[in-house]
Amino acid sequence: MRERFLKGGSDALADYELLELILTLAIPRRDVKPLAKKLIETFDGYAGVLSADVEALRGIAGLGDTAIAAIKSVQASAVLLARSKSHNKPVLSNWQAVAEYLQGAMAGLAREQFRLLFLDRQNRLIADEVISDGTVDHTPVYPREVVRRALGNNATAIILVHNHPSGDVTPSRDDIVMTRELGEACKKIGIAVHDHIIVGSTGQTSFRDLGLL
């Protein structure tokens, strides 16, 4: 399996085999194929395993912290790679790379998280900050804090991002009201809100695409 991977890359292996290779490095001298298949089934695919919450992974029999660290390090590496591709270019013309980064960073979170992308006059990414962690279905966001962070980063525009752990990326009424409040607060100081993205386990929703901005 290792030789097939080195010769043919990820295309040479099935998803469970790629996960098996990761587990083999973390759990030597043990047949980890059944464990790899169980993880794929439990978390609905390879991507689901990588983005799974640490506590959820600890609930799988036979999966210790060393193996969990190996799995999460692969996810972290993928997120960092995607993030590097999203920098140093105008965000709005490089949106696919930004979307991939957000999906990798947020899709598997067990709680709601609110993130801001701060942009300069050329719409290049200045900073990317998590400003709030919440519960499974709510995260508090305060206009004053958003404005303060935007001014502190010398941003001329921002993109709002949060995730829905349920997987449903339909904006809630609270999401819509909060976006309007943030948009009005930012407009008063000359900062544009380009979009609000909701990230789910299988995709994303854009407020601008829905006509909500």
Image (cartoon, rainbow, N blue to C red):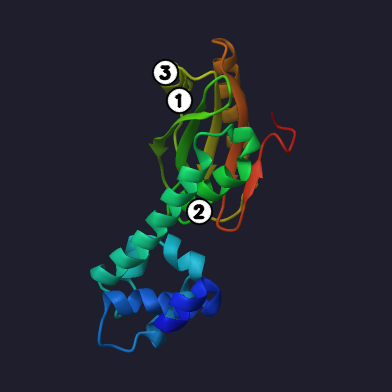
- Residue at the front extreme of this rendering: 7
In the displayed structure image, the side of residue 94 where residue 119 appears, left or right:
left
Residue ID for mark 2: 107
Q: Position of residue 83 (x, y in %)?
A: 47, 44
Kind of residue at badge 3: Arg
Foreground mark, 1 or 2?
2
Q: Position of residue 210 (x, y in %)?
A: 73, 38
Q: Residues within 10 Å of mark 2 (few under 14, many from 20)?
A: many
**Residue name at image x 28 percent, y 74 percent:** 26
Secondary element at tag 1: loop
- Depth check, front residue: 147 or 14: 14
**Residue name at image x 25 percent, y 73 percent:** 64
In the displayed structure image, the side of residue 43 where residue 26 appears, left or right:
left
In the rendered image, the quadrant that contains the C terminus is top right
Kind of residue at badge 2: Ala
Q: Which label sits on residue 148?
A: 3
- Depth check, front residue: 187 or 9: 9
Residue 110 location, quadrant: bottom left
**Residue name at image x 42 percent, y 75 percent:** 19
Disc 2 and disc 3 in contact, CB within 8 angstroms: no
Secondary element at tag 2: loop
Residue ID for mark 1: 142
Q: Position of residue 156 (x, y in %)?
A: 54, 18
Can residue 60 be seen here? The reply is no
